[in-house]
Structure formats: structure tokens, C-alpha cells
């Protein structure tokens, strides 16, 4: 119980430390990428890149959560009942000896 109380009291501090570390690391990656690309560097641009990049990732994640269909290399696949990828046209499962996603 004492550990639970100590953790509950420290939780807001831990959350702010984690959020600060994430923000600093994301901004440093954006800054380094701008430098490598030869683009002008500024804190405002780096923060804009971070917000836009994370927003795009969130939009892709939410779109993926709402659909069971995937297009991969001009093939229509869906996620089957057991989590396996199933080809739309044939209904074959990708695993277990069925046709592979990529022909060699």
C-alpha cells in the first residue's frame, strides 16, 4: 500500500518528465533532419515539424483502426478472424502454405 501511495504522488511528476523527454527528443530529431536536408533551422520550424508529423501518424493510426482491409503491392488483403492476412480475391490465407505476398 505504501508503494501505491508513493507511486500515486509521483505520477504527475513522472508524466511531466516523460512528456518533456519525448518533446526534447522529437525536436532534436526534427532539428537534425532539417540540418541534414540543408533546410533552415529554427525552434519554431522544428516544433511545427513535430506537431505535423505526430498528427499525420495519429491520422494514419486512426484510419487503420477503422478498417480491416489493406492494399499491399497491388494486392487487396483483409485481416481475418484469427488475425491472419487473407487475400480478397481467392480467400487464401497468407500463412500456412498459401500463396506468399511476394513472388520470387
Image (cartoon, helix red, strand yellow):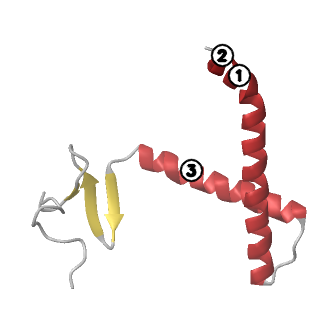
Q: Which residue is label 2 attached to?
A: 2
Residue 7 horizontal side relative to residue 39, left or right: left
Q: CA distance from mark 2 to mark 3?
A: 41 Å
- Report the disc number at residue 59: 3
Residue 55 horizontal side relative to residue 61, left or right: right
Residue 98 horizontal side relative to residue 79, left or right: left
Q: Position of residue 85 (x, y in %)?
A: 24, 57
Q: How many labels were placed on the picture?
A: 3
Where residue 7 sits, quadrant-wise, is top right
Q: Position of residue 59 (x, y in %)?
A: 56, 50
Outermost residue, front side: 2
Image quadrant containing the C terminus: bottom left
In front: label 2 or label 3: 2
Element type at mark 2: helix
Residue 40 horizontal side relative to residue 11, left or right: right
- Report the disc number at residue 6: 1
Amino acid at each position: 500500500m505504501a508503494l501505491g501511495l508513493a507511486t500515486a504522488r509521483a505520477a504527475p511528476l513522472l508524466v511531466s518528465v516523460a512528456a518533456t523527454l519525448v518533446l526534447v527528443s522529437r525536436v532534436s530529431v526534427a532539428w537534425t533532419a532539417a540540418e541534414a536536408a540543408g533546410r533552415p533551422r529554427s525552434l519554431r520550424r522544428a516544433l511545427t515539424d513535430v506537431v505535423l508529423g505526430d498528427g499525420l501518424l495519429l491520422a494514419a493510426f486512426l484510419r487503420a483502426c477503422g478498417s480491416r482491409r489493406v492494399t499491399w503491392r497491388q494486392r487487396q488483403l483483409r485481416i481475418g478472424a484469427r488475425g491472419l492476412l487473407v487475400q480478397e480475391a481467392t480467400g487464401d490465407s497468407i500463412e500456412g502454405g498459401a500463396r506468399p505476398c511476394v513472388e520470387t
